[in-house]
Amino acid sequence: MTANIEVKHTLIDESSIRNLLVQYNLENVIHCSFLSRGLNDTYLVTTKKESYIFRIYRYGWRDRTSVHFEIDAINHLRDNNFNVSFPILNRNNSYLCEIAAPEGLRYGVLFSYTKGERPLINEESSQLIGGTLGKMHELSDGFQSNHNRGFKLDLNHLLDEPVEVIAPVLKRYLGKEADEALKEVVKDIKTELAAKELEVGFCHGDFHNHNMHINNREIEVFDFDCSAIGYRAYDVAVSWWNLINNYKSQEQDCWGDFLTGYLNHRNLSKDDRESLPLFITARRIWLLGTMLRNDDVWGTNWINKASMELFILQVRTDMIRDKG
């Protein structure tokens, strides 16, 4: 007996990607390989002269108008001479390629390839990375799009939505007290932020050294999948969060250099600066909620008592930093 199955997420074979690429004005494609799987699927496409990135957005993650908002933002930055991986039109004069996947309609976009390599974290590169974000915020001040992103980097998206997913998991492994502790932290964050005048504008949403390459001391940024209108301080705090989590021994030296680079291009008000530790916690909460909500990307074997205890410990440590 043959069973009917439901599909969450399909991985499309490279031969099918090659067929899709016929829609673009590319020279003979000599190589196409699956590069990485995350919230979206990424393929490396190589011709005799150039390399490209073909991204297929996850079904249900970003709809047509949301992807168009991202494309509008990237094109705005490129038009203002900001180094960015940019989308490429197909023969139908469209940036989007429709893909009838088993799980539903998905969208593919061809991007230019960012040359170079991931920046190492040191004092010099941190200042360069900070300056790049400051420049991006400066150049995107006037950005507008006729397309609806579908979300903002606001407290609903960063705190309320993920807490809905996190709360039952915390209860299961650590009991009601942990759930109440998290909700108290969220309440405190909201109260403190409500008393501040924070800058709002276009944000990358995931700005750290994993989403950029450096080539001849020039940084080019890619992966605007989490970009939206939101708190600029959150965008800055994501880079601090990256240093704390992935480069702890260098955090103290490099964070100051990052800020110096940022301030060379863009002012950061007293309220925005004081909010940064709060947004580090918001980043943790958003990320955990995203991972729990997309278990077909991250799996479930990491979801246990130890990981939830670590999360609560990190959140409490963040609060100490905020008060310090």
Image (spheres, rainbow, N blue to C red):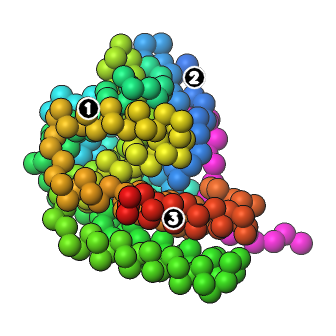
Amino acid on which the number 1 mark rests in the picture: Gly
Q: Is residue 276 above or below residue 193?
A: above
Depth order, front residue of 80/302: 302
- Counting from the top left corner in percent of width and height, residue 77 is at 21, 38
Q: Nearer the viewer, mark 2 or mark 1?
A: 1
Q: Gap in Å between the C-alphas at discs 3 and 1?
A: 27 Å
Mark 1 falls on what kind of element? helix
Please count the marks in the image.
3
- Counting from the top left corner in percent of width and height, residue 323 is at 37, 63
Q: Is residue 125 above or below residue 313?
A: above
Q: Quadrant of the N terminus?
A: bottom right
Amino acid on which the number 2 mark rests in the picture: His
Residue found 55% across the figure and 60% down from its top: 314
Q: Earlier in the sequence, mark 3 or mark 1?
A: 1
**Taken as a whole, is the magenta stretch helix, strand or loop?**
loop
User: Is-magenta flag for residue 15?
Assistant: yes
Q: Earlier in the sequence, mark 2 or mark 1?
A: 2
| Region of the chain picked out in magenta, as a range | 1-18
Question: Within 10 Å of the Cα at label 3, are there few (<14), some (14-19), or many (20+) other Cα atoms?
Answer: many
Q: Gap in Å between the C-alphas at discs 2 and 1?
A: 38 Å
Q: Would you say the residues marked 2 and 1 are in contact, meaning their CB atoms lie under 8 Å apart?
A: no
Question: Within 10 Å of the Cα at label 1, are there few (<14), some (14-19), or many (20+) other Cα atoms?
Answer: many
Q: Quadrant of the C terminus?
A: bottom left
Residue found 61% across the figure and 35% down from its top: 34
Q: Residue furthest front?
A: 324
Q: Disc 1 marks which residue? A: 261
Q: Disc 2 marks which residue? A: 31
